[in-house]
Image (spheres, rainbow, N blue to C red):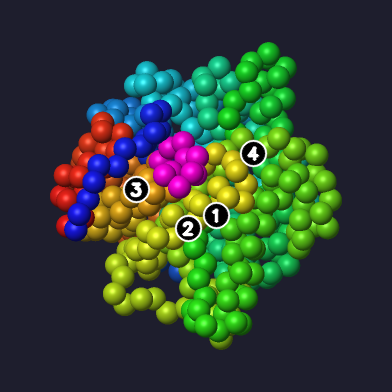
């Protein structure tokens, strides 16, 4: 194949993403409770120790620095900070202050996610995202974190992948709370939207009251290219359009318009959503094929293409064209800057990961050429970690983690990414090396 050098815009930011529960160990939250229920985690493991990142963050950030990373995205674990309603754990706040300072010391920009899937147990006991007051229960935590860390030049992410929380937790039942109910799913989506609004307005308010320049704030979406199983069947096409709107757009359209759109609401204004989206965080892994003959609401997707490589355990197909499609779609519909906050593949064969990252970055470059404003790219993930319902059976790290010894070993893909970062682009030679 013929390649040419692909340069990214000056100032494009590169790095990696992770989340508290998947890496830290020692968390007590709705997921640690879920992990105790037999059968919920495919390989029967739990995140009790995870990567022990809570104690080893310095070592992990040393590696991120050596690998040239400029940004690190991580989450602050709500259940640590607010173990019971309104009670603050000062030691945990100081822990995260050390984490932030450790990044800054290494010249790595911290990007903080306020909610990455996990809730304190007390919040679950109050009905979690089905509680009409859920957003108000979440707000004090956001305010406290914004207040504590407003001096560190943080880029803020409010909610990670609300539609994954909703679809997998409330519709397909594979994540907590394990429901299979469309009405509940829509209600949870609405309350997560309100929580995003609350988070953003708390941050804005804290910065304003301190006379600080407003930071950049974004929700982070999981996006999937939704395709009809039979492109000539109008029922399949209609279903694909319906799911695309529901999964990829309803929530962000609401956040940007400031209105709780149908079916979550009746278009009513929710004031804290105003000015809540500076940019859109976009996580992309694969496509979803849907068919009118199958029950999407029960988690039934179309057949996989046997010729495509798939993500370990999760079976997501290697589908870089979908990345280009989704970036362009968000750009054209909303005209908001995009930060690619997660992209990667679970695999034990690092050559697949190298090919995955390289071919997805080609699509990012193409989208930028075609006008999309993309500010950065974060690989998921820095190290192998606890992959939710898959446990430890899906390896997403550019750094291998031996879960017996906790030894970290960067994979070839990590060095490939370092070269990409140094070049701020994909050289012809690198593409030949990793794609041919
Ligand atoms: C995302 C999620 C991450 C990670 C990744 C790979 O949906 O934000 O926590 O698990 O998928 O499955």
Q: CA distance from mark 3 to mark 2?
A: 13 Å
Whether residue 38 is visible, yes or no, is: no
Describe residue 236's horizontal placement relative to residue 420 as left or right: right
Q: CA distance from mark 1 to mark 3?
A: 17 Å
Q: Determine which residue is flagged by label 1.
A: 329
Q: Determine which residue is flagged by label 4.
A: 277
Residue 200 horizontal/vertical position (percent): 67, 35
Which label number is shown at residue 325? 2
Whether the residue under disc 2 has CB within 8 Å of ligand 1? no
Is residue 373 magenta-colored? yes
The magenta stretch spans which residues?
368-377
Tell me the element at label 2.
helix
| First along the sequence among labels 4 and 3 | 4
Q: Are marks 3 and 2 in contact (CB under 8 Å)?
A: no
The crowd level at tag 3 (other Cα within 10 Å; few <14, some 14-19, many 20+) is many
Q: Are marks 1 and 4 in contact (CB under 8 Å)?
A: no
Q: CA distance from mark 2 to mark 1?
A: 6 Å
| First along the sequence among labels 3 and 2 | 2
Q: CA distance from mark 1 to mark 4?
A: 17 Å
Tell me the element at label 4.
loop
Front residue of 192 and 368: 368
The image quarter containing residue 219 is top right
């Amino acid at each position: 194949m013929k390649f040419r050098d692909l340069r990214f815009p000056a100032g494009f930011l590169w790095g990696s993403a992770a989340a508290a529960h998947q890496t830290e160990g020692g968390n007590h939250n709705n997921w640690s409770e879920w992990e105790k229920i037999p059968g919920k985690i495919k390989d029967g493991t739990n995140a009790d120790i995870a990567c022990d990142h809570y104690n080893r963050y310095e070592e992990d950030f040393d590696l991120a620095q050596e690998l040239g990373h400029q940004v690190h995205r991580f989450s602050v674990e709500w259940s640590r900070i607010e173990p019971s309603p309104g009670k603050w754990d000062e030691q945990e706040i100081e822990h995260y202050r050390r984490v932030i300072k450790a990044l800054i010391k290494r010249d790595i920009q911290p990007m903080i996610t306020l909610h990455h899937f996990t809730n304190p147990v007390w919040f679950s006991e109050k009905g979690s995202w089905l509680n009409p007051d859920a957003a108000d229960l979440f707000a004090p935590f956001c305010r406290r974190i914004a207040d504590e860390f407003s001096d560190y030049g943080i880029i803020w992410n409010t909610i990670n992948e609300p539609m994954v929380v909703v679809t997998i937790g409330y519709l397909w039942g594979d994540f907590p709370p394990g429901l299979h109910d469309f009405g509940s799913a829509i209600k949870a989506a609405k309350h997560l939207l309100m929580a995003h609004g609350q988070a953003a307005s708390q941050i804005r308010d804290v910065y304003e009251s301190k006379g600080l320049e407003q930071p950049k704030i974004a929700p982070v979406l999981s996006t999937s290219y939704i395709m009809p199983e039979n492109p000539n069947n109008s029922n399949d096409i209609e279903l694909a359009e319906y799911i695309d709107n529901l999964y990829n757009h309803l929530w962000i359209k609401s956040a940007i318009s400031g209105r709780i759109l149908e079916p979550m609401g009746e278009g009513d204004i929710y004031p804290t959503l105003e000015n809540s989206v500076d940019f859109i965080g976009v996580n992309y892994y694969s496509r979803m094929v849907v068919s009118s003959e199958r029950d999407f609401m029960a988690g039934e997707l179309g057949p996989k293409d046997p010729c495509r490589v798939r993500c370990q355990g999760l079976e997501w197909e290697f589908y870089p064209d979908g990345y280009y499609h989704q970036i362009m779609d968000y750009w054209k519909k909303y005209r908001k800057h995009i930060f690619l906050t997660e992209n990667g593949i679970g695999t034990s064969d690092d050559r697949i990961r190298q090919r995955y990252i390289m071919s997805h970055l080609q699509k990012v470059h193409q989208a930028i050429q075609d006008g999309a404003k993309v500010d950065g790219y974060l690989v998921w993930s820095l190290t192998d970690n606890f992959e939710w319902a898959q446990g430890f059976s899906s390896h997403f790290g550019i750094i291998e983690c031996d879960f017996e010894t906790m030894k970290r070993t960067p994979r070839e893909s990590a060095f490939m990414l370092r070269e990409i970062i140094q070049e701020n682009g994909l050289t012809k030679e690198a593409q030949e090396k990793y794609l041919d």
